[in-house]
């Protein structure tokens, strides 16, 4: 009887372990890649509003770094220096510093914005030139083109879920409501 109980217990434990290993939830890599692809597809022409520039165009590329739980948006801006030089700004999101409980959406006439605050004392995002001191922000705000973004069913809900998943996988803050 003890032998049968031990075999049954082992079989149940093995099944639970294999189910946990075969989870259908997306990995961090898959989640960051999905966010990257949607951000490139639906980003707004008015991508960022910086204190010293009126606007910056769409990102030319977005790179994710799983080991740092970050995503960096690269976008060009023509510098008014009389020589028509271009610089590439970087806007980096730190998922481990975000508070998933603060995700909200706002809009203006042309854009939808996802807004997320950092955990207490954290840096949600950074922007500046490569190798510059840049500017740290306690909040993240990313605009998406409203007309194209709303053309895909449930995209706002899915984007929120993807950001929450990335935040959880990176050790950011999120408490799921039970009711």
Image (cartoon, grey):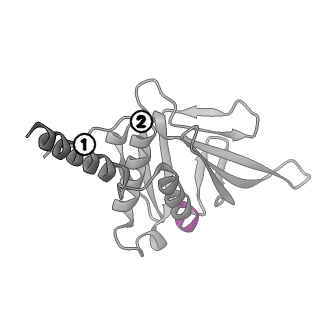
Q: Residue 170 magenta-drawn? A: no
The kind of secondary structure element at disc 1 is loop
The residue identified by callout 2 is 172
102 relative to 31 in the view: left or right = left
* Inter-mark Cα distance, 1 to 2: 13 Å
Instruction: Look at 23% across and 43% down and name the residue there.
Output: 10
Placement of 176 over or under 158, stated as above or below? above
32 relative to 90 in the view: left or right = left
Instruction: Look at 40% across and 71% down and name the residue there.
Output: 150
Q: Which mark is residue 176?
A: 1
Spot the residue most to the left.
Answer: 1
Is residue 113 visible in the rendered structure shown here? yes
The kind of secondary structure element at disc 2 is loop
Location of the N terminus (image quadrant): top left
Instruction: Look at 58% across and 39% down and name the residue there.
Output: 67
Spot the residue most to the bottom.
Answer: 151
Q: Tag count in the figure? A: 2
Magenta stretch in the rendered image: 39-43
Is residue 106 visible in the rendered structure shown here? no
Mark 2 burial class by Cα count in 10 Å: few <14, some 14-19, many 20+: many
The answer to which of 155 and 32 lies nearer the viewer is 32
The picture places residue 78, in percent across and down from the top left corner, at 79, 54
Mark 1 burial class by Cα count in 10 Å: few <14, some 14-19, many 20+: few
Q: Residue 42 magenta-drawn? A: yes
171 relative to 72 in the view: left or right = left
The answer to which of 56 and 70 lies nearer the viewer is 70
């Amino acid at each position: 009887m003890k032998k049968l109980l031990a075999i049954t217990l082992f079989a149940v434990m093995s099944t639970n372990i294999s189910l946990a290993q075969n989870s259908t939830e997306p990995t961090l890599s898959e989640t960051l890649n999905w966010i990257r692809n949607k951000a490139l597809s639906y980003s707004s022409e008015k991508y960022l509003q910086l204190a010293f520039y009126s606007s910056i165009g769409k990102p030319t590329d977005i790179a994710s770094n799983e080991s740092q739980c970050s995503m960096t948006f690269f976008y060009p801006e023509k510098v008014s220096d009389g020589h028509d030089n271009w610089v590439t700004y970087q806007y980096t999101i730190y998922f481990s510093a975000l508070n998933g409980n603060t995700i909200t959406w706002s809009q203006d006439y042309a854009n939808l914005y996802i807004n997320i605050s950092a955990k207490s004392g954290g840096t949600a995002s950074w922007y500046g030139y490569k190798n510059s001191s840049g500017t740290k922000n306690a909040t993240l705000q990313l605009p998406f083109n409203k007309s194209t973004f709303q053309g895909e069913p449930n995209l706002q809900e899915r984007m929120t879920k993807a950001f929450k998943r990335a935040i959880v996988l990176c050790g950011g803050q999120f408490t799921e409501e039970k009711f």
